[in-house]
Image (cartoon, helix red, strand yellow):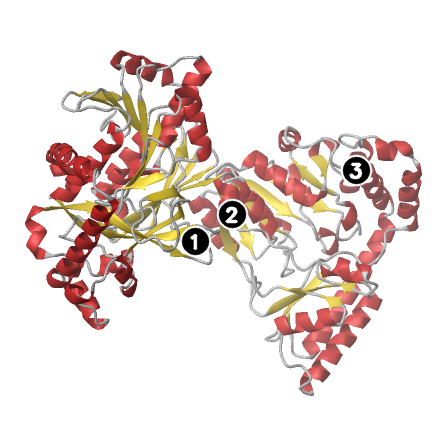
Amino acid sequence: MHKKSIRKLAQLHGWWTYQSFLKRTRTWSEDQRQAWIRKQLQQTLVGAFEGTRYYAEVFKNIGFDPRTDFEGPQTLARLPILTKEIIRERFEDLVDPRYRRLSAYAETSGTTGKPMRMLLNESYIALDYACMYEMWAQAGYRFRDPFLALRSYVPSRAGDPLWIHDKAQNTLFMSAYHFSPRLAEEYMRAIQDFQPKFIRSYPSSLLVLAEYLERTGQSLPSVKGLFTASETLALHEREAIERVFGRILFDWYGMTEPTLVAYEGADHDGLNMVWQYGHAEFLPDDTLAPGDCRLIATSLQNPVMPFIRYDTGDMVTRHASENETTLYPRKLARVQGRKDDVILTPDGRRLPSVNFYSVFRSAPGVVRFQIVQFGASDIVVNIESTEATFERHPAFLKVKEEMRSRFGDAMAVEYRINQRFETNRDGKTPVVVRRRANKAVEERKEYVLSSQVAWSRSRAGEDILKLDWNEADALPSERVRERLAALVQDAHSIIWYPEAYPAALHEALAKHHGIEEAKLLATHGSDMALAYLTQCYVTSGDKVMIVAPGYDNFRAVAEQRGGLAMHFTFNGEGDFPLQEMLRKIQNEVPRLIYLTNPNNPIGYVLPPESIAAICAAAAKESALVVVDEAYAEFAEQDCVPLLKQFPNLVIVRTFSKAFGLAGLRVGYLMGDVTVIETIKRVANPKHLTTFAQVAAQTVLEDWPQVKAQIEEVKVQRTRFIDFLRSHEVKCFASHGNFVLFQMPEATELTRWFEAKGILIRDRSSQLAQSARITIGGKESTDRLIALFTDYWRAKAADEITGG
């Protein structure tokens, strides 16, 4: 039978136990108290030794016989610590069959991971209630005084009342799940009608009530005592509650495990441990603050399943009245222990973790669960189940219904079965975790930048050849530099915000590409253009198809908006599988498709007719196609003419590569007028500096010089590819200002080059054993080829020992 099935009997038995046992033993002298604890501890050890296989085995292994070797509480230090893992693995070996008939099953909440099952004697359960009555009595409670329980009740179905009155207990049970600022007035009317003398509640729910009373200037003069449990009471919660009710708050520390109970006394000085219930030890730990200890406890009242030196998993602070030599402790200063967060709903409700346990306890195969809240309204429920098809089990549908009734319709809930659980710094797995940022940001894989050592080494005076980020290695024209120098002398260029939507630059871009100005928008780098596109066209749950390997920053910004990145992979070998991609577009129905063309990092280019086919397939699914043409100037053709044919095509360009303005951050979008107008609604109109605008406009005017530099890069690109292939290095044909190659020593080579002052990019994370090198003019290519030759010479001479 389960603990719940004997609750009513145990409550009545508990009242008798309080009256007949706890009240009597409170009058004992200190000598009587210590003698009783010694006797009870020895009886517990002897009973465990004689009645359970586990303790018989453990005690024999260490040569301990509790019938003859017990000397007092100090003897416990000889015995091993009992952990949750041992209890789960050796459950039956820990049970004393002599007491099984009068016992009931119970489970822990699972605040440190998996719930744990145990057996409890009915007399122990009664003692648990007796301790509660004792705590309530110090606030003046008498049997059947009107009690408000802002906990322990959840409507089972939609439409059920939010509170019920239990006449037998004279208790008004109210749903803590639905108690929100919006419903506080309705709750308050019912509370005032009931006129409770005492309130027991989760701290989080009591805080909502106190805040409402303070905000509205109301009071509950009938209330003489407040009792909190099941959550750690934070200092700010206590202060806010006592500001409204006065100093009538009593906190309770307990657990399902039959080991220890402590409660706040009338002096409000720490927590009084119920020594008749269990015995505590405080173990020091170097990882904790001074005065803090691990709480180890031994049960004195549960012979069916004795817990001896049980690691509670909680951290406590000793009371000032006791020290390391105290063998019979009475008090705790405070419990640091397991502080679960609460779920905060958009309508202001606080949902404590403890009330979710019942949802999963009856679900077959559920080992543990965890609820993670992201931002205000995103929830992920992690479930570990032994059922291989738990998602199809009727119990799972019931779980989803129960959770929906608690969260309401304003929260988006995602269920993950047998996936990764969140852990805290202590390695524990809390039931409730709250993340401040939204789910997309918290869970997205970070876009990792490559090494930035070029700046620090250059500032230190080193001659660095930077060939890792595909920047230009030639300065823009003299005219560009002269105009920038003139701007430094123009006060307005520095103290005024830049021109919004720069007309001169837009006019120059429109002329350069032969399109209407209304079809383009300059941005603070092409990265900003990509961010604007995802902001406008990607919402949570949207599929985003990305041709990989590619520019990973787009994946990052898409996931930041809640997009689900799905990759279409082509490693550059053979022909691009166009028909396969078109089928995937039709089957997956992505919201947006992104590809780099020419591809980065491989270097292949798709012809306009392939891009047209992708745009046509995407149009059938109402998808946007984003073509990142960061390297288009180095290719023989681009997709700009397709803009007239496909309103779902957007082209992104940059001034960082061919034009040599990477440090000024200038990019731009080209697309249908409707797309550009949509993006303008979210774009910052003053994000492009005056210096960037003037430089970009000037390099466009200097296109013949830029074109000549591009042609030189193409010549050196061919020269370098021929050089590598002559040494039997696999190279990919490139249409950008870079070359990707594969060799087993790619990572080693990258590090060796860096030590010599030439920075290249290890791309093995995208394509096995690969590296990418930026191609510039003849001088940098000469230096590059010379260093390759030196590397192979050193390699042949065994002068290179590894990465």
Three-letter amino acid code of the residue under disc 3: Thr
Identify the residue shown where x is 28% and y is 22%: 198
What's the mark number on residue 227?
Answer: none
- Find out whether the residues at labels 1 and 3 contact each other: C-beta distance under 8 Å: no
How packed mark 2 is, by other alpha carbons closer than 10 Å (few <14, some 14-19, many 20 or more), is some
Distance of mark 1 from mark 3, alpha carbons?
47 Å
Image position, residue 44 (x, y; %)? 17, 55
Q: Which residue is mark 1?
A: 426
Label 1 or label 2, whichever comes before in sequence order? 1
Image position, residue 719 (x, y; %)? 76, 70
Element carrying mark 1: loop
Label 2 or label 3, whichever comes before in sequence order? 2
Quadrant occupied by the C terminus = bottom right
User: Which of these two is toward me, 673 or 193?
Assistant: 193
Distance of mark 1 from mark 2, alpha carbons?
23 Å
Element carrying mark 2: loop
> Would you say 688 lies left or right of 244 here?
right
Looking at the image, residue 760 lies above or below residue 232: below
Q: Is residue 616 visible?
A: no
Image position, residue 154 (x, y; %)? 25, 29
Label 1 or label 3, whichever comes before in sequence order? 1
What's the mark number on residue 689?
Answer: 3
Distance of mark 2 from mark 3, alpha carbons?
30 Å
Three-letter amino acid code of the residue under disc 1: Asp
Three-letter amino acid code of the residue under disc 2: Arg
Identify the residue shown where x is 40% and y is 32%: 411
Element carrying mark 3: loop
Q: Which residue is mark 2?
A: 444
User: Which of these two is toward me, 151 or 549?
Assistant: 151
